[in-house]
Image (cartoon, coloured by chain):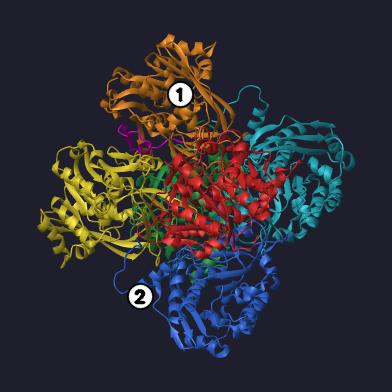
Chain colours: A yellow, B blue, C red, D cyan, E green, F orange
Amino acid sequence: MEKKAFDLLTFGEIMLRLSPPRHARIVDGDVFEKRAGGAELNVASGVALLGLRTGIISRLPQNELGTFIKNRIRFVGVSDDFLCYDDSPSARLGIYYYEMGAAPRKPTIVYDRFNASVCGITLEDIPEEAFSSARMFHLSGISLALGTRDVAIQVLKKFKEHGAKISFDVNYRANLWGEDEARETIQSILPLVDVLFVSEETSRRMFHKTGELHDIMKSYAQEYGVKIVATTQRTVISPRKHNFTSVIYSAKEDQFYTEAPYTNIDVIDRIGSGDAYVAGVLFGLLKYDDPHKAMQFGNATSSVKNTVPGDLPSSDFKEIDRIIREHNATGPVSEMNR
Amino acid sequence: MEKKAFDLLTFGEIMLRLSPPRHARIVDGDVFEKRAGGAELNVASGVALLGLRTGIISRLPQNELGTFIKNRIRFVGVSDDFLCYDDSPSARLGIYYYEMGAAPRKPTIVYDRFNASVCGITLEDIPEEAFSSARMFHLSGISLALGTRDVAIQVLKKFKEHGAKISFDVNYRANLWGEDEARETIQSILPLVDVLFVSEETSRRMFHKTGELHDIMKSYAQEYGVKIVATTQRTVISPRKHNFTSVIYSAKEDQFYTEAPYTNIDVIDRIGSGDAYVAGVLFGLLKYDDPHKAMQFGNATSSVKNTVPGDLPSSDFKEIDRIIREHNATGPVSEMNR
Amino acid sequence: MEKKAFDLLTFGEIMLRLSPPRHARIVDGDVFEKRAGGAELNVASGVALLGLRTGIISRLPQNELGTFIKNRIRFVGVSDDFLCYDDSPSARLGIYYYEMGAAPRKPTIVYDRFNASVCGITLEDIPEEAFSSARMFHLSGISLALGTRDVAIQVLKKFKEHGAKISFDVNYRANLWGEDEARETIQSILPLVDVLFVSEETSRRMFHKTGELHDIMKSYAQEYGVKIVATTQRTVISPRKHNFTSVIYSAKEDQFYTEAPYTNIDVIDRIGSGDAYVAGVLFGLLKYDDPHKAMQFGNATSSVKNTVPGDLPSSDFKEIDRIIREHNATGPVSEMNR
Amino acid sequence: MEKKAFDLLTFGEIMLRLSPPRHARIVDGDVFEKRAGGAELNVASGVALLGLRTGIISRLPQNELGTFIKNRIRFVGVSDDFLCYDDSPSARLGIYYYEMGAAPRKPTIVYDRFNASVCGITLEDIPEEAFSSARMFHLSGISLALGTRDVAIQVLKKFKEHGAKISFDVNYRANLWGEDEARETIQSILPLVDVLFVSEETSRRMFHKTGELHDIMKSYAQEYGVKIVATTQRTVISPRKHNFTSVIYSAKEDQFYTEAPYTNIDVIDRIGSGDAYVAGVLFGLLKYDDPHKAMQFGNATSSVKNTVPGDLPSSDFKEIDRIIREHNATGPVSEMNR
Amino acid sequence: MEKKAFDLLTFGEIMLRLSPPRHARIVDGDVFEKRAGGAELNVASGVALLGLRTGIISRLPQNELGTFIKNRIRFVGVSDDFLCYDDSPSARLGIYYYEMGAAPRKPTIVYDRFNASVCGITLEDIPEEAFSSARMFHLSGISLALGTRDVAIQVLKKFKEHGAKISFDVNYRANLWGEDEARETIQSILPLVDVLFVSEETSRRMFHKTGELHDIMKSYAQEYGVKIVATTQRTVISPRKHNFTSVIYSAKEDQFYTEAPYTNIDVIDRIGSGDAYVAGVLFGLLKYDDPHKAMQFGNATSSVKNTVPGDLPSSDFKEIDRIIREHNATGPVSEMNR
Amino acid sequence: MEKKAFDLLTFGEIMLRLSPPRHARIVDGDVFEKRAGGAELNVASGVALLGLRTGIISRLPQNELGTFIKNRIRFVGVSDDFLCYDDSPSARLGIYYYEMGAAPRKPTIVYDRFNASVCGITLEDIPEEAFSSARMFHLSGISLALGTRDVAIQVLKKFKEHGAKISFDVNYRANLWGEDEARETIQSILPLVDVLFVSEETSRRMFHKTGELHDIMKSYAQEYGVKIVATTQRTVISPRKHNFTSVIYSAKEDQFYTEAPYTNIDVIDRIGSGDAYVAGVLFGLLKYDDPHKAMQFGNATSSVKNTVPGDLPSSDFKEIDRIIREHNATGPVSEMNR
């Protein structure tokens, strides 16, 4: 592949995440932990941590909250070159409140993201050079459900035109838009997509797919020309204990890749583990062009994300590489990293 | 039932609870978390959170600690109308220190509740109108073990006279009084009790009951005319993992109500989960007059209480209702409340 | 005065206040302190702490954030009887971010209050009984600057019709509305106002008053029939050191009341000290019907509010009474409350 | 002086001190800072930090709270050899709650120390060897005001008999006992006292002394044979800004020692600064037998104690020595210890 | 055994341990928890908590960090009599950073211990009386791997000469030294060792032992005259869930002692649990001279150490004794210590 | 000036700073706040925050601590392009411990920076392109006092050869090197320096300058060809209250620039305020090429740095610009940024 300034660019909303400390509740207590989060930022950050150059296109309020987010973006190694700012009186940062669960109490999310500054972003806010500077562009379905839909589609098309691979995570959220609207919108961009992330449940319910999972996954390649289709398989034992693996279909080899699940994952914070999966897979594709490695990196990155607080992954290549090796090890492994 | 100002009134000591932060120990560290707690307050608060009007009769020191407790009482939705205050030099708030456990280390409680201001409460401190203002009155056996015994019994009788249903949780604590003294005292009030909470172990050891649990429970109805008898069934897998369900006997239908246990409860803080059970049951009775619903609300409210820090429940109707529905659901349930 | 259920009712927005811990900055760090705040709540809470019965009319989102605010309202002793809830998908709680200052850095406030649930409140949300249940109704000019203007004026009028005294704090904020719009709106309600709080600067700039402060204050009585006019006098030595006193004009006696300023106030958190002043004055008027006592309570309550974190006052009658006595003491006063 | 196992032994109650974090209030918030405190422990700890061997005679509950206190005692370098334990059901640790002030709000203390385990200490709990193992014994008047009075006097006498110098800090607290009772009790032990700490106010009010301070101080030597009389001089500019110095009278040289006050002390936590003064003075006497040095060490140790949170001093010899030198320096001093 | 001033003395490095709060990561966040740690200190502290007199020989920097460590040493009941101090400009305290794990993420340790002040300790720094003042001397293999090797061996020999029993924990760390160097060094001191702690893995890999575990353990007695050989058996189910037991061989009785493992241990902090095992065993030997009790105390002390944060144990005799009894109980045990 | 990739590059050690929370002490307590710090990083960060592109050349350990520092560097907007990593077993990050002061207790610093990874940096670790990519290069005298001296001088010369302006802050620290060695070393590079920061005390003591300050400053221009000489003037009223201004001499105009001091600065954290001054001055020169503006930006940036915790500045252009305007305002200024 040719050399470009960025391996991956993304587009999407970046939010302030506010959480009561572990086990405390939103309705009580004196503090919120403050963090940055957002599906595309999570992906860009995960890929950056693994060693590639990434950036995010977004719009932030021109105030202290926007600066906090900008600082956090840089902290996690993602370029802020393509951020723009909203200095209108109504500028605001979308927020979500997240409370962790403990069986039988489930995690709770409260969104407050209407009218965020990112909804006012226009194509003119994005420098033309951005579109030709990335090997791959990633988008989440969330950006199609919100006020950013039209711009998001335009941006995706411009990246495609400039030769970037297109990655798309369906990420369907029933509380954001209806199934019919989502299906129609997404189907209109699927022909542009090279790498598709879609859950089995979404394939069945929203896309009305039926039959075996493998056939469902393959159908996206057949119908829309998608090259890589990835579907995660999470088993929720309790809010604090999950199993995780995934299946990847590569059209080129017409082959499925999977592995034994990571079991008994200690779930500290589940938010962002889906995005971490995307990050691991995209890293595997961008770095090695190898769907098997992509599946391995996806599974490991996602599994370990569950164990750290916050949306954003915090694992670098060394850590993920070691976890993959140990996941595949047959003999005893040391109990501690010294 | 006729409309009264309160659905439930209770009487009892309210204490300051001091706990080292999760996993830290009383003997070490720099901070205590400060909270309010007490069996009857926990019950009143649980019922209030579910949507009924409740209050507590108690006596607090007339100082900053008393004010803190008063503020917390209101925070959890319980009326402070029937609180009175002790402005003597020896005024004090009872305290207990609680340290969480982790297998094989058990939770530890240290009490410092002698001579608390509540012990000096008299019938004159309680406005006459209180006794006729509640549909139900609840008392815990703890109030009979402490210096509040005589007043507690008088109060219970006055509520009975004014037509309130009487709820009583035996709550036997061997470190507070002996079995003989407890048995005699409690037997003297059992004829007044409409709703009785008693554990299987207490029935056998303290009340010298033998035979099947169902027969034991029924015997309270037969001997004392109790209408509802409720017995919880907790399995302690480890300090941080419990199973929980309960059995309720209703004399009217001469029937037992139970359900499959909540399993693998993530125990963050076990204190108050028995009181939360009482709250759920009383809510079910007061709201629906339905022993089956009472059992369901009791089990759900108690199970979820284990997952939140502090004595006091923090679940409202919406949360408990959802947990009950999911406990009874047969298909897959969503992993998160969005 | 006749006996009513409430001494004071207010109407206004209640917000979530998020602050970095003392000296930390919004743009950095990991936590926000979470609190409730809002001009009218601050007033209602201050009066309640001093011993009178108060409540607030407002609208909150029907979610965990709304519940948090409701809990805090009760914690500070204000009735939640007249709160209503917004369960629409766009329900939201207004937020403001507050960062404390340290010379030469000033405190910073970032508002995010557009489209809050309170803006959708209607007269139908308020039970008719509310209007006749209070001896006094208080409103802040902020409620006239926001989407709540029309309802606020209707509410004020209904209280007036039902015989409540009307208290109004101009509280002009140039960042919320223009001077002309503010002047016209406020002038339309001034004939209904009994107790007016207005700063000297606002009198001069926004109301175009000129001349001596005493004459300016008197003019509100002469032109609009206001009975009590109160103007604070704050000297900012540094963000952490203020002096404070006030002047009150009573039309009945045609007299001005003032006292020597509180000096060298240790400012921990300045927000809400203006509202605490209002609370102290209203308490003095409601309790003693005495403008001199009102001025004393206003000055003391406001001064001490500066020394506690959060918008809400936390001083009860005992504390304020002692501070007033010591402010007027001539001999030595003890260094500590034991 | 002959060599003994301890330079200083003390006798007294050790309490748990609970404080809301700086600026927070007892009536609000979620945590208390937990610390050990007590007049005599503060003194013993201050002398130990400066380099001498000290211990404390006291009685603690035989539970986790007692262990916490024991650990803290050792942490600050004081021997726990002469602690004994109360394993009765009513064992309890005295508590006090302390809230810091900010002008015009004063610091607040709430005591909960009745019936503490220390009140049950008897002479039999103290090993006979203790009385002959110390060069000096120190007592605070607080121990004479509480349930420990009789034992305290017996202990003091036994130390005197075994040749220890006796230090006594009058430390009169009007909320603990009346002036007449205090005067009579203290006068009965004054003939045994070698080193006396008494404030000017207490000399005048409680001991009915009149005239010049120097004459008053001298009178204790003349009437009771006291060798050293020390009186502190604190000026409270605000709860957070004090000036401090002291006067020491030495009967042997018939001379007064004083120095220019430490000015603009940044008061973080005022509690224990009086005890720190005692510690500094006793260190000066025990180490150098020099009243001038004693006055210097007393002033410096007390001044710097105000700047650290908690009752207990935390300054070692190096720090105090440097502060004394800089207090007396005429040229510029470096701004920082590097 | 004859009475000596100390039951146990140890020699070794004491480090500052810095950990992000539970679940947080070194690479992120704003705080480190600060603690003291070190293999020999952990052992000395564990034995002291159980009721015997212990001390540690070490060298600390003569600065605030050294003072912090000294304070913590005393806090945990270990004598600081034999600490010496380094006041050179290069004085430093060794540090290690510890991050807890959560499956599949393992715990991480980063060492920064080169050139610590302890490496400069010489025999002259240790008062001659130390060597004859202890019934037993304990050393960890870590002290042989670092710059302290020569002095450690000299110290061990001097204690042996003065009649102390010698305890040695092989504690092999591949990241500190090679297997050949370790084997040769350790073999040179094994003839002096009375009590040997060695893991099965180390026996096989580093000492090249083969065959059954029992035969391996016995061989140390046969080859070097070791009296007690102890080998732990830990099963790591996940970073937060372990099982634990051990085998002890006593040459005198030529017998092996073991028991059913503690299962499902809630691992809060695994560091120091090996040292806690040593502490339990040594306590059993020193107090009861009973290998079976030693094995029981070792297993219980180690198991419970896993449940408390920090390297240092915090369990006293009462707690360990109760845990042992409950581990061996056949009927139901109470769920809580009241 | 020509366009280069960076406006400013620096070279120097980046350390981990560990501080007890405000008012707490190193010798006590449970946590350290963790931050990044270092003279040159502070400068680069300050200039970046004001809007220019900066980077730092340094060497970090290849471990989690190095990653933490790298993340923080990016957080504050400084490029990590020229960082290199040390993966040797002895890799370490230099540390310093900082405890804030409160009169009469001074701030305390304990360094532990020997043998840090940065000391092993070589010219080969720095990509050749670095030297031509910056308009200005800044060095602190601290880098000449440590093991980095030779490389630092080589780097400075290479930047000079490639046309960068050279900025040098003498920053003399007597505890790092002697006056003679410092003077000789610094004099050898002064002919290369364009912008010189030197305190009056250092000019007099270390450089043996005498006479008026203005003449001293001018002499550096005359003797070494320095273009800009800047000297700060700080008055320490107490550890928590400073005044600050500075004098700048520009050789081109042969003129001195100064202004009235910022008074009564609330000092929260004094560390890094000298570096913030350098940052402000360099920004003024790089952005406006105007010594008067440079002096204004230096004074404002330094003054406000004192009010935020941590070494690193956190003020952006908007904030500094407002502070400068208000410092020069003659009328009243608003009390708060809304």
Q: Residues within 10 Å of mark 2 (few under 14, many from 20)?
A: few
Disc 2/disc 1 C-alpha distance (Å):
70 Å
Of marks 2 and 1, the one in the foreground: 1
Residue D330, horizontal then vertical, whole percent? 66, 22
Which quadrant, please, contains the N terminus of chain F? top left
- Give a yes or no on whether discs 2 and 1 share a subunit: no
Q: Which residue is mark 2?
A: B328
Point out the stretch of residues depicted in magenta.
F73-95
Q: Which residue is mark 1?
A: F296
As drawn, the label of residue F264 is none
Residue A3, horizontal then vertical, whole percent? 17, 37
Residue projecting furthest to the top: F222
- In the rendered view, would you say C125 is above or below C267? below
Residue A160, horizontal then vertical, whole percent? 15, 45
* Residue F84 highlighted magenta (yes or no): yes
Foreground residue among E334 and C251: C251
Left/right of residue B172 with respect to residue F95 in the rendered view: right
Question: In what element is the residue under mark 1?
Answer: helix
Q: Chain of mark 2?
A: B
* Residue F251 highlighted magenta (yes or no): no
Foreground residue among F11 and E207: F11
Residue name at image x 46 percent, y 81 percent: B291
* Residue A248: quadrant of the picture: bottom left
Question: In what element is the residue under mark 2?
Answer: loop
